[in-house]
Amino acid sequence: MHIAEGFLPAPHALGWTLAAAPFVAHGARAVVKEVRENPESTLLLGAAGAFTFVLSAIKLPSITGSSSHPTGTGPGAILFRPPVMALLGTVVLLFQALLLAHGGLTTLGANAFAFAVVGPWTGYLVYRLTRATGVGLLPAVFAGVALADLATYVTTSLQLALAFPDASTGFAGALVKFLGVFALTQVPLAVGEGLLGVLLFRVLTVNARPELERLGILRPAPLAPTGGAA
Amino acid sequence: MTGLAVDDAAWASAWRRRAPGDKLLLCAGLVGCALLLPPWPGALLVAASAVALALGPARVPAGTFLRAIRWPLAFIAIGAGTAVVTVDGGGLGWAPDAAERAGALAGRAVAGSAAVLLLATTTPMSDLLPQLRRLRVPAAVVEIASVTYRLLFVLLDSLGTVREAQAARMGWSSPRRSYRSAGMLAAAVLTRSWDRARRMQEGLAGRGMETGLRVLPDAQPSSRPFLALGLALPVGIAAVTLVVR
């Protein structure tokens, strides 16, 4: 659910661009520091961006009978942290605007605020909080990824309601309208993306455990006793 | 063929060799007109100009252009329709000026989308990314975006191959199996992206390239007639719109 080019009035497009800019700049600074210290991470970060783009191209079956596409930023926030996702998510949104005609250039700031800032931060905080209360990895991933998706959709509805308040009930009425219309696809998609996140991390814990340990998602397994005679 | 129709169109476009800065100026002018001018007749003139330039001199296939603009059209139709419905205690109804507001909103968005699509279908991303340096985007960020662009085709190819193999094994025959397959597909793509990045890094390090992936830019000289078009067309649209209004 990307806001199309030209859909937001110019002051709103500018305002959301200014709102997203500090987060994206913070992400860029973090990435530049990382690349300066470890030049080899350029390729890994590029791969993370490409994965986020490709993840949004996977079709998920929807309860309405059609299919929908995940946002891809929830798993990315857990794997690569929100500051990095603020930058990578914005790069992915730029690519989606210019390679798929999803979103736009003047609406890039608004879409980045919803997809690359609010979604990843919400998902990551929910994931960390649930993990801190002793919940296992997979339920925490489900909660984080599903709520990242929901937060993105609520933010986009809020942006549209601010731009187009209802003629009789103002901002509140418009928010109800946009939340209601997009809920038909976005609420099932949030649940679906949460399930996809669980399945993704379940496979990764088996097939890519060293990478998850390096990213701090899993604790390194204790070394098995050798059991040899002294 | 890269697998993304808009990107394929950009590489094959008759405007491929034109300077990216020239095309950016033209498209930015058209987007500015769509956003700032009164929608009638501004939006109509912008949309008509963008479509005529894309299908005419830039020789973008009409089918590619129409298929690409379907996505924004779906959002615009739903968004504009929702914006002009009113909600009050009595239920739903149309705003007093619903048709005019919906027309203005949809007109602006269609015109803006067509202008951006003109840029997208005539300029490959690898030509646009170096332009970000002019906006003072750090070199490291542009480099990561360039790697992302190059890797995403490799990953899309992997995605298609793995999905085809899953489909051949009935992996997408029911919602339950589809979710399981989607999870395994995402994990396969992620681990392949890590593996590909690691191998590329080792290959580059073996060639002594450890501090950057610098390449010679593909210089495309600016054209004065094209620059004149990029300035004159938005100014002309603005003048006609303001006179007609």
Image (tube, coloured by chain):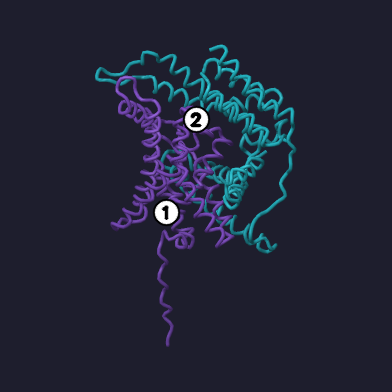
Q: Amino acid at mark 2?
A: Ala
The C terminus of chain A - image quarter: bottom left
Give the crowd class for mark 2: few <14, some 14-19, many >=20 residues within 10 Å. many
Residue drawn at the location 73% of the way across and 35% of the way down: B222
Give the crowd class for mark 1: few <14, some 14-19, many >=20 residues within 10 Å. some
Task: Farthest residue to the bottom: give it.
Answer: A230
Q: Quadrant of residue B46?
A: top right
What count of labels does the image hold? 2
Q: Are marks 2 and 1 on the same chain?
A: yes
Q: Quadrant of residue A169?
A: top left
Q: Which chain is drawn using cyan?
A: B
- Secondary structure category for the residue under label 2: loop
Residue drawn at the location 66% of the way across and 32% of the way down: B23
**Mark closer to the chain start, 2 or 1:** 2
Decide: is B224 above or below B211: above
Q: Nearer the viewer, mark 2 or mark 1?
A: 2
Residue drawn at the location 53% of the way across and 23% of the way down: B110
Picture coordinates of residue A99 (x, y %)?
Answer: 58, 36
Picture coordinates of residue B239 (x, y %)?
Answer: 60, 17
In the visual, does A138 lie left or right of B188?
A: left
Q: Nearer the viewer, residue B29 or A184?
A: B29
**Disc 2 target residue:** A4
In the visual, does B239 lie left or right of A123?
A: right
In the visual, does B232 lie left or right of A65?
A: right
The chain letter under disc 1 is: A
Decide: is A60 above or below B81: below
Q: Are marks 2 and 1 in contact (CB under 8 Å)?
A: no
**Disc 1 target residue:** A202
Q: Which chain is drawn using purple?
A: A
Alpha-carbon span between mark 2 and mark 1: 35 Å
- Secondary structure category for the residue under label 1: helix
